[in-house]
Image (spheres, rainbow, N blue to C red):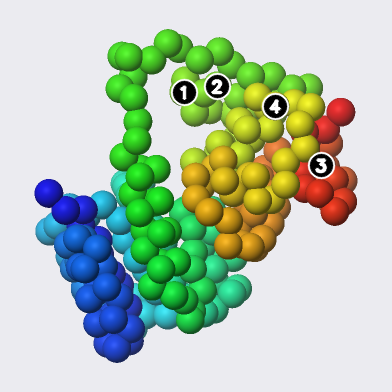
Amino acid sequence: MPNSILLVEDDSDISKLVKSHLELENFKVLTAFDGEEAIALLQKNKVDLILLDLMLPKISGMDVLKQIRVNSLIPVLIISAKGSDIDKALGLGFGADDYISKPFSMIELTARVHAAIRRATQYVPREEQSKPAPLYFKELSLDPDTFSAQVKGKSIQLTSKEFHILKLFMTNQKRVFTKEQIYHFIWEDDYYGNENVINVHIRRLREKIEEDPSNPQYIQTVWGIGYKLGE
C-alpha cells in the first residue's frame, strides 16, 4: 500500500507539479490549497507525511503546524521561501521536522520525503528493546527510555530533534561533530548544505539547557569545524 502525503500549497501550478511527480514515485497525494482545507482533510484522512507551505490563506501554515503538533508527531516538511518563518517552524516550539526552500528540485524533494517517512516508520517495538541507561554530563541528565531530560534536577521540554541531538553529544562526549555529521546522524539524509537547520536547532537547544546561551557550557562551538560537548 503506497504511503500517503498531504500537500498543502496554495499555488496551483506548484501543487500540480509536486503532486504529479510524487504520484510517479508511487505516493498517494492529497492536496489542500489553504490552511482550513488542510485541517479538514487531516481530520478525515490518515497520512504519513505533510508537505506544508507557510504562506497560506484562511489559516497560516504556522497555525496549521501548531494544530498538528497538539496531538500528532506526523513528519512535517516545510516548503517555503520565507526564511524567518522557516526559523520559527524549525524553532521547535512548533516542531517541523525539516524544510526545503523554494525553488527546489523534484529530486531533492523526493529524497527528503523518502527520508522523512523512513525515519518515522523505522522503530523496534518497546518489548523487544533492552532498557537504555540514562546519560549524564555535569548537571545534565538524559533518559532515552522515557525521552526526558533534566538540568540541575529541573525537567526541560525538548522536541524530538533536540532530544536526539543532545543524545548524540552525550553518547560521544569527546567527539567533535561537523554540521554535516549532525545532519547525517539525526536526519539520516544527505546533507544539502542546510546550515540553517542545524543552527536553529543548536540555538534553541542552548536556550533550554544553558544558563547563559551566549557562553555555552554544554554544547560548545569548535570554530571552523562544528560542535562538541563541553569539557
Sequence-wise first label, 4 or 1: 1
Which numbered disc covers residue 184? none
Circle nearer the viewer, 3 or 1: 3
Q: Are marks 2 and 1 in contact (CB under 8 Å)?
A: yes
- Residue placed at 31% from the left, 14% from the top? 127
Residue type at numbered disc 4 = Asn
Q: Is residue 152 above or below residue 164?
A: above
- Residue placed at 63% from the left, 33% from the top? 168
Q: Is residue 52 left or right of residue 196?
A: left
Which numbered disc covers residue 146? 1
CA distance separating discs 3 and 1 = 26 Å
Q: Secondary structure at mark 2?
A: strand
Q: Position of residue 144 (x, y in %)?
A: 52, 23
What residue is disc 4 on?
172
What residue is disc 2 on?
143
Q: Position of residue 183 (x, y in %)?
A: 59, 49
Residue type at numbered disc 2 = Asp
Residue 189 visible to the viewer: yes
Q: Quadrant of residue 210?
A: top right
Residue type at numbered disc 3 = Gln
CA distance separating discs 4 and 2 = 15 Å
Q: Secondary structure at mark 3?
A: strand
What residue is disc 3 on?
220
Residue type at numbered disc 1 = Thr
Q: Is residue 218 left or right of residue 115?
A: right
Sequence-wise first label, 3 or 2: 2
Q: Is residue 17 left or right of residue 167?
A: left
Q: Are marks 3 and 1 in contact (CB under 8 Å)?
A: no
Q: Are marks 3 and 2 in contact (CB under 8 Å)?
A: no
Q: Which is more toward the observer, 84 or 126?
A: 126
Mark 4 surroundings within 10 Å by alpha-carbon count, few (fewer than 14), some (14 through 19), many (20 or more): few
Circle nearer the viewer, 3 or 2: 3
